[in-house]
Every structure is written in structure tokens, then in C-alpha cells.
Amino acid sequence: MPPVKSRRAEYTESTRDAVLDNAARLFGEQGYGATSLDEVAAAARVTKGAIYHHFTNKAALMTALIDRLERDAHRRLHGRFAELSATSDPATAGLAVIDEFLMMCSDPVYGGLVFREAPIALGWQAWRACEEEYAIVLVEEVLREMQRTGAIPGPVTGTLVTVVFGMLCSSGQLLAETPEEQRPRVRDELRSTYVAFLAGLATGAPDRILPDRQ
């Protein structure tokens, strides 16, 4: 039986969640740089000192927020892939996960914060470290399952994982910057690109298209 949380622990946890929830909304609406901790505190109905109790500064708050967003995204996408892989081939499941990812990137909070605000606010290295813990792990898992079942030839190298991760990041950044009314069209174009890419991996098309190196 899990231990029962004290009221103090529950209050502390709810305060942290309120700060993260309101920071996500304000950073998404106004941008990280244009939002002060005073505004976050007012929106969360806590003191600024309460924010500093949980986060050393605004960058630490952003780091925790991106970590939560990516952890939730990983859980959601991983669950989707596992569910679909049980009833269909991994290539179909992988494409369905890409479809869901593209929809998530169209959300102003997830897409805007993870792919537009965070790399600037945290710096490339800190942002990449978070992505390595969640996104890159998921990309490698999907590719390895596709390779295991013969959907793509092996081996699944670090280079391949990095290239696919880079494609997904570029897609996220593109959708984050695209006006809302144009996102359905851009998602369709991105999906066609991924279909062609996966088909090329499966058939070895690059070997037929590119000349042999001398």
C-alpha cells in the first residue's frame, strides 16, 4: 500500500503544479522572455518566494516545465506505439505515432514551448539533454522495433536515430511557427515526407538513386 501523503506534502505538490501550469500558459501566450516570475506568481496565486522554493530561477522553472511536457509526450506516444504494434506492423504504428506527434506540435503550449521557446531560453545543450532523455529514446525504440520485424533493414545506428530526431525537431519548429489556419496543410506535407522517407528506408531506394562513390 503506497504511503499516504501529508497535507503539507499535498499542498507543496499542488503549489508546484499550479506554478508549472500557469508558467506553461503564460510562456505559450507571451513567450518566455516576455513573461516575468511576478506574472507567473500572480497567475498561480502564490508568492514569488513560493516559486523560488521550488525553482532556483526562471530557467530552472522552464527546465522543469519542458521536462514535464516531454515526459508526458513520451508516455503518450510510447503507449500509442505499443498499443498499435500489438495489432499492426511497426511501420504502420510508427507512422501513426508521427501523425500524433505532428498534432501535438500544432498545440501552442507543447509545440511553442518545446520547439520555439526552450532552445532559446535554455540553450542548445540543456535543451538537447532533455530531448535525449525522452524523444531520442523513443525514436530509437521505434526504429529498432521496425528493424526487428523487417520493416526497415538494419542496423539502427546512432546516425540514423540522430537524422530522424532532427527531422522531427525541424517539423516541430516549423509547425510552431506556422499560422494556425495553415497547420493542416503543413501537417499533410510533412506526413507525405515521412511516408516517402520510411518507404525509402524499407526498400533501399537511396542506393538506387544516388551514384556509387568512387
Image (cartoon, rainbow, N blue to C red):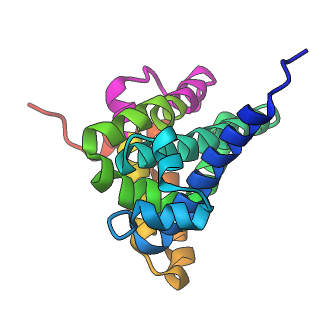
Residue positioned 57% across, 42% down in the render:
68
Q: Quadrant of residue 38?
A: bottom left
Residue positioned 52% across, 75% down in the render:
183
Residue 14 position, x and y percent, is 70, 45
Q: Is residue 8 left or right of residue 136?
A: right
Q: Residue furthest bottom?
A: 181
Q: Main secondary structure of the magenta part?
A: helix
Residue 177 position, x and y percent, is 39, 72
Residue 202 in sight here: yes
Quarter of the picture holding the C terminus: top left
**Residue 164 in the image: above or below residue 100:** above
Residue 132 position, x and y percent, is 41, 31
Front-lying residue, 176 or 99 = 176
Front-lying residue, 30 or 7 = 7
Q: Is residue 210 left or right of residue 9?
A: left
Residue positioned 45% across, 41% down in the render:
55
Front-lying residue, 189 or 102 = 102
Q: Which residues are magenta?
A: 140-163
Residue 107 in sight here: no
Residue positioned 18% across, 35% down in the render:
212
Quarter of the picture holding the N terminus: top right
| Magenta segment includes 158 | yes
Residue 128 position, x and y percent, is 34, 38
| Magenta segment includes 43 | no
Q: Is residue 102 left or right of residue 5?
A: left
